[in-house]
């Protein structure tokens, strides 16, 4: 039985951002620094007066057909920055709610094995009987061959979102629940995805009074990076070297923005997919619940026992009284 991860949807139909855009223009592009693949992806384009949807669409009009090489980590960073989840394609109808699919697809790009990850998407789509258009299939072929344009990548964000969207009533039409994301990540791993990833953390956090948003931090031998598919005021998505937030407490206090996270990591007994979440979203939680799926090398999976964690420290705690 799938654990209950949050009583509310993970994303609104059109989420509101709580971080107001700066009244000042974005800084000019920084010159790339040696060893940092992601310092050159901020194009510094001005669009401070545009809505998120119009700002994101403007990036696709500017870069939508630019080809990017998936074996070049710096070029992968540029591709992610030019693929905000709000695109200019009529065929991708779930733009405002596909943050979970975008986070998973960005993690697949950052993993670095484009062929294995394209194959995993294809196999899972077939297994779950998700219909792929000719354009979707063409984008998967491009990914398998090692190159993508932002518009192709946007299609594949949408494909991964549709593959993961199993109709969980906790998410409805408002985005992926933690159950759906954890299940999809596990299924992708069964089909050979994430072969280069040492650890991948997907985090759902508040982005407004009734809105939640998924982002991702990926760690491989090539480095650690985090990505956020929501367009900034200039329309570009965020991708940067180093980790994003990957825990539910900071400085001895619960992070009130935290809703849930899903972490994939290899282990001696197989691959572990850990899910942590809070049940009560209306106030400070008494505990954070954690479960794990343990995936063996032969593809069989078992669910570990649930544990409860102190929300301020992460230490083991007693189950909350009901």
Image (cartoon, rainbow, N blue to C red):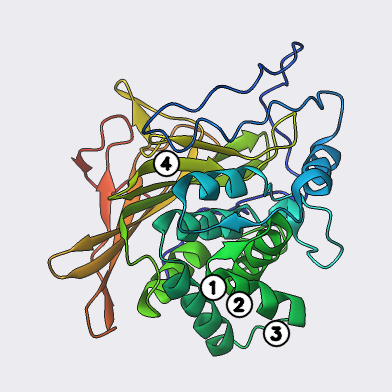
Mark 2 or mark 4: which comes first in sequence? Answer: 2
| Quarter of the figure with residue 133 | bottom right
Mark 2 or mark 3: which comes first in sequence? Answer: 3
**Is residue 5 visible in the rendered structure shown here?**
no
Above or below, 229 relative to 143: above
Q: Nearer the viewer, residue 316 or 135?
A: 135
Tag 2's secondary structure?
A: helix
From the top left corner, tell me how far across and down residue 116 is, in percent.
42, 74
* Separation (CA) of disc 2 from disc 4: 25 Å
Residue pointed to by mark 4: 225
Tell me what residue is drawn at x 43 percent, y 26 percent: 33
Mark 4 or mark 1: which comes first in sequence? Answer: 1
The local crowd at label 2, few if under 14, some if 14 to 19, many if 20 or more residues have their Cα within 10 Å, is some
Mark 3 or mark 1: which comes first in sequence? Answer: 3
* Labels 2, 3: front one: 2
* Labels 4, 1: front one: 1
Residue pointed to by mark 3: 131
Tell me what residue is drawn at x 42 percent, y 41 percent: 225
* Labels 2, 4: front one: 2
From the top left corner, tell me how far across and down residue 234 is, in percent.
75, 30
Image-based side of 272 in relation to 285, left or right: left
**Is residue 242 visible in the rendered structure shown here?**
yes
Number of the label disc, if any, that sits on residue 141: 2
* Separation (CA) of disc 4 from disc 1: 23 Å
Q: Tell me if label 2 and label 1 are in contact, CB under 8 Å.
A: yes
* Labels 2, 1: front one: 1
Q: Tell me if label 2 and label 3 are in contact, CB under 8 Å.
A: no
From the top left corner, tell me how far across and down residue 34 is, in percent.
39, 29
Residue pointed to by mark 1: 145
């Amino acid at each position: 039985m799938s654990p209950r991860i949050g009583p509310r949807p993970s994303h609104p139909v059109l989420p509101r951002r709580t971080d107001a855009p700066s009244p000042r223009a974005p800084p000019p592009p920084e010159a790339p620094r040696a060893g940092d693949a992601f310092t050159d992806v901020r194009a510094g384009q001005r669009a401070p007066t545009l809505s998120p949807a119009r700002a994101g669409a403007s990036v696709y009009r500017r870069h939508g057909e630019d080809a990017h090489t998936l074996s070049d980590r710096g070029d992968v960073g540029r591709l992610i920055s030019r693929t905000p989840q709000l695109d200019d394609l009529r065929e991708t109808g779930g733009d405002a709610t596909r943050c979970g699919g975008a986070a998973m697809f960005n993690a697949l790009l950052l993993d670095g094995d484009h062929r294995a990850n394209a194959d995993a998407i294809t196999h899972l789509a077939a297994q779950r009987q998700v219909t792929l258009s000719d354009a979707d299939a063409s984008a998967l072929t491009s990914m398998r061959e090692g190159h993508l344009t932002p518009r192709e990548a946007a299609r594949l964000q949408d494909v991964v979102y549709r593959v993961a969207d199993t109709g969980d009533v906790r998410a409805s039409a408002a985005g992926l629940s933690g159950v759906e994301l954890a299940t999809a990540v596990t299924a992708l791993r069964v089909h050979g995805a994430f072969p280069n990833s040492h650890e991948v953390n997907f985090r759902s956090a508040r982005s407004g009074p009734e809105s939640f948003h998924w982002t991702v931090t990926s760690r491989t031998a090539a480095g650690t990076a985090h990505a956020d598919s929501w367009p900034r005021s200039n329309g570009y998505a965020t991708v940067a070297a180093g980790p994003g937030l990957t825990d539910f407490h900071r400085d001895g206090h619960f992070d009130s923005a935290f809703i849930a996270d899903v972490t994939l990591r290899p282990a001696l007994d197989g691959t572990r997919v850990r899910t942590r979440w809070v049940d009560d979203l209306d106030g400070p939680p008494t505990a954070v619940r954690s479960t794990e799926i343990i995936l063996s090398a032969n593809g069989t999976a078992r669910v570990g026992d649930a544990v409860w964690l102190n929300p301020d420290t992460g230490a083991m705690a007693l189950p909350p009284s009901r």
